[in-house]
């Protein structure tokens, strides 16, 4: 399995297993010369595997004892803004913790040392050497390092993901602010099922939001226009050109016929293809159908 394909939990388990093998071999008493040679070879192999895993990991891997950093891989050095791992050795581990998280981190460290328990994956902020903060995910386990108790942590930089999440939240807030205040109907549907409708859509169709979300697009389209509307819906999903805007007739909840001018386009909604549309009353008698 390639390192980039490993989950953080798998990586931690493999690192812990290797450290345990090394510790067991270091503490094992072997008298026979041949057995001693085999033990040395096994120890060397385990150490080499552990070292190689540290080198190729894209995540930062740190080991600290008595509150100070005693080992860190190249990815860790890059994460914290150091030129090399050696630059960080001996640094108090709490120097890397953002002040807002100091108390929580100290409590987890006491738990790991005192109870020998693995610390589950948690999000927090770390500090680089230049004191800029980064968002990280951290998981830690107690281990034996060079015959002494230590804590090993796997740290993943999630700053880019957090920025993307924040940008998405801001975008969604802007969309909802616009959608909730505009006089144009705005709606999103997947397949033919409505997934979102704004207050203006309720007013135009005379249905409540709850009612519309239980309906599909074709339920509100006048029978004379359902085939055309469905054909254009399918064509749009296929990526084929569709006239926009165009006029279509709907039926309101109270049975009135109403002309709308509609525009729509493809989007992704909750990870799946969808269509977002806008509609305003058409030009034919203010959107109403003339009486016969």
Image: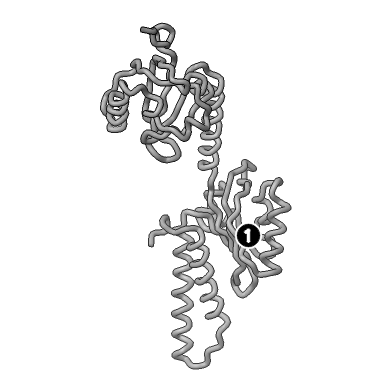
Q: On screen, 104 above or below 117?
A: above
Name the colour scheme: one colour
Residue at (52, 20) in percent of width and height: 203
Q: Position of residue 233 (x, y in %)?
A: 32, 29
Q: How many marks?
A: 1
Which residue lies at the image location 51% right of the left edge and 66% below the top edge? 13
Camera-nearest residue between 110 and 256: 256
Q: Which residue is mark 1?
A: 69
Quarter of the rendering containing residue 192: top left
Residue 3 locus on image (x, y percent): 42, 58
Q: Which residue is most to the front?
A: 292
| Quarter of the image where one finds residue 291 | top left
- Mark 1, secondary structure of its residue: strand
Q: Work out whether residue 36 or residue 28 is closer to the camera in this orientation and state it.
A: 28
- Residue at 30% in and 19% down: 243
The image quadrant where one finds the N terminus is bottom left
Relative to 8, say whether 229 is above or below.
above
User: Where residue 242 appears, x then y in whole percent?
Assistant: 29, 22
The residue lying toward the viewer, choosing from 27 and 164, is 164
Image: 168 above or below 175: below
Residue drawn at the location 55% of the way across and 34% of the way down: 169
- Label 1 neighbour load within 10 Å: few <14, some 14-19, many 20+: many
Which residue is farthest bottom? 32
Q: Position of residue 229 (x, y in %)?
A: 32, 25
- Height in image: 25 above or below 47? below
- Image position of 194 (left or right of 154): left
Q: Quadrant of the C terminus?
A: top left
């Amino acid at each position: 399995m390639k390192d980039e394909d490993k989950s953080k939990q798998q990586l931690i388990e493999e690192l812990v297993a290797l450290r345990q093998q090394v510790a067991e071999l270091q503490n094992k008493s072997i008298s026979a010369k041949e057995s001693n040679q085999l033990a040395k070879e096994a120890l060397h192999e385990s150490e080499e595997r552990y070292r190689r895993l540290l080198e190729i990991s894209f995540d930062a891997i740190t080991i600290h004892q008595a509150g100070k950093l005693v080992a860190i891989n190249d990815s860790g050095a890059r994460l914290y803004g150091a030129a090399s791992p050696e630059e960080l050795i001996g640094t108090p581990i709490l120097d890397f913790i953002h002040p807002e998280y100091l108390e929580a981190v100290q409590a987890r460290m006491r738990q790991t040392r005192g109870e020998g328990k693995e610390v589950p994956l948690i999000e927090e902020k770390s500090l680089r050497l230049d004191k800029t903060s980064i968002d990280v995910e951290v998981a830690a386990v107690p281990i034996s390092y060079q015959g002494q108790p230590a804590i090993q942590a796997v740290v993943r930089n999630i700053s880019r993901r957090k920025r993307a999440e924040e940008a998405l939240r801001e975008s969604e807030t802007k969309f909802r602010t616009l959608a909730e205040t505009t006089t144009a109907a705005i709606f999103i549907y997947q397949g033919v099922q409505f997934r979102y409708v704004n207050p203006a859509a309720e007013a135009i169709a005379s249905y409540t939001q709850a009612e519309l979300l239980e309906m599909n697009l074709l339920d509100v389209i006048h029978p004379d226009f359902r085939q055309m509307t469905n054909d254009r819906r399918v064509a749009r999903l296929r990526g084929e050109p569709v006239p926009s805007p165009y006029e279509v007739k709907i039926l309101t909840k109270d049975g009135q016929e109403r002309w709308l001018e509609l525009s729509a386009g493809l989007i992704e909604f909750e990870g799946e293809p969808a269509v977002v549309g806008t509609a305003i009353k058409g030009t034919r008698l203010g959107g109403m159908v003339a009486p016969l």
